[in-house]
Amino acid sequence: DGGITQSPKYLFRKEGQNVTLSCEQNLNHDAMYWYRQDPGQGLRLIYYSQIVNDFQKGDIAEGYSVSREKKESFPLTVTSAQKNPTAFYLCASSSPRTGTYNEQFFGPGTRLTVL
Amino acid sequence: QKEVEQNSGPLSVPEGAIASLNCTYSDRGSQSFFWYRQYSGKSPELIMSIYSNGDKEDGRFTAQLNKASQYVSLLIRDSQPSDSATYLCAVRGYNKLIFGAGTRLAVHP
């Protein structure tokens, strides 16, 4: 099945720890995105990548880091510098090839809780 | 002014009625608009995209776009309890989508 997978589904972090959230897609999409969603709020863009080995900061990149070594994978690290990391993290991907470059498709999400 | 604004709701409609969800946006140059449905605890699911002024229909869903008024709406005909969810409006910005906070829809039997 084609799709986007995220792991783990739930993650608990102690203060001062770095944690890495996984995002993998087998849709052959070029672009991948990380969003954060807080209760009752819309999605806020953390980082995005349009090609391998290149990525750009979104609106709330501070305290986060990413890598894009493979087209299929776009992991997000939540560092100890992120002061309020408890949130629902969503990965998305899109492709220009079908003419619908704008349409983004989401993975199931990772719910991160800081203890 | 927020870039994409939606009424948070909840919008409560009876089963079988038409639900009307509205969204306004601030960037007059925006060209692409999307509606996502998000069930509680789940990730957003793309249900409609619209690029041209006017209406676009897909099953029970109709998206309406008025670029002059900077307004996009989603109509859900014959609403079902399974339509109860939060509906997110998204507008294409520079290399990204800008999301509204969402409208919570409750369809009661």
Image: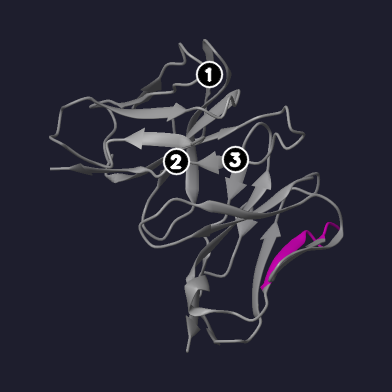
Give the magenta part as a residue range: B66-75
Does residue A67 appear left or right of residue A105 in this picture?
left
Return the residue nearer the eye: A53 or B82.
B82
Residue B22 pos. (x, y %): 66, 69
Q: Quadrant of residue A22?
A: top left
Real-space CA distance between mark 1 and mark 2, rounded to the nearest whole angstrom: 19 Å
Query: Decide: marks 3, 1 in contact (CB < 8 A)?
Result: no
Which residue: 73% across, 27% down? Answer: A97
Which residue: 73% across, 37% down? Answer: A100
The disc labelled 1 sits on which kind of residue? Answer: Phe
Q: Would you place residue A54 above or below residue B93 in this image?
A: above
How is this picture coloured?
A: one colour
Q: Which residue bears the numbered disc 3? A: A104
Does residue A55 appear left or right of residue A23 in this picture?
right
Q: Quadrant of residue B72?
A: bottom right
Residue B96 pos. (x, y %): 62, 36
Q: In the rendered structure, the residue with mark 2 lies on which chain?
A: A
Residue A33 pos. (x, y %): 51, 32
Q: How busy is the neighbourhood of tag 1: few (under 14 within 10 Å), some, or many (20 plus)?
A: some
The disc labelled 3 sits on which kind of residue? Answer: Gln
Q: How busy is the neighbourhood of tag 2: few (under 14 within 10 Å), some, or many (20 plus)?
A: many
Q: Which mark is residue A55?
A: 1
Query: Decide: marks 1, 2 in contact (CB < 8 A)?
Result: no
Q: Quadrant of residue B5?
A: bottom right
Any part of residue A62 in sight: no
Q: Which residue bears the numbered disc 2? A: A107
The disc labelled 2 sits on which kind of residue? Answer: Gly
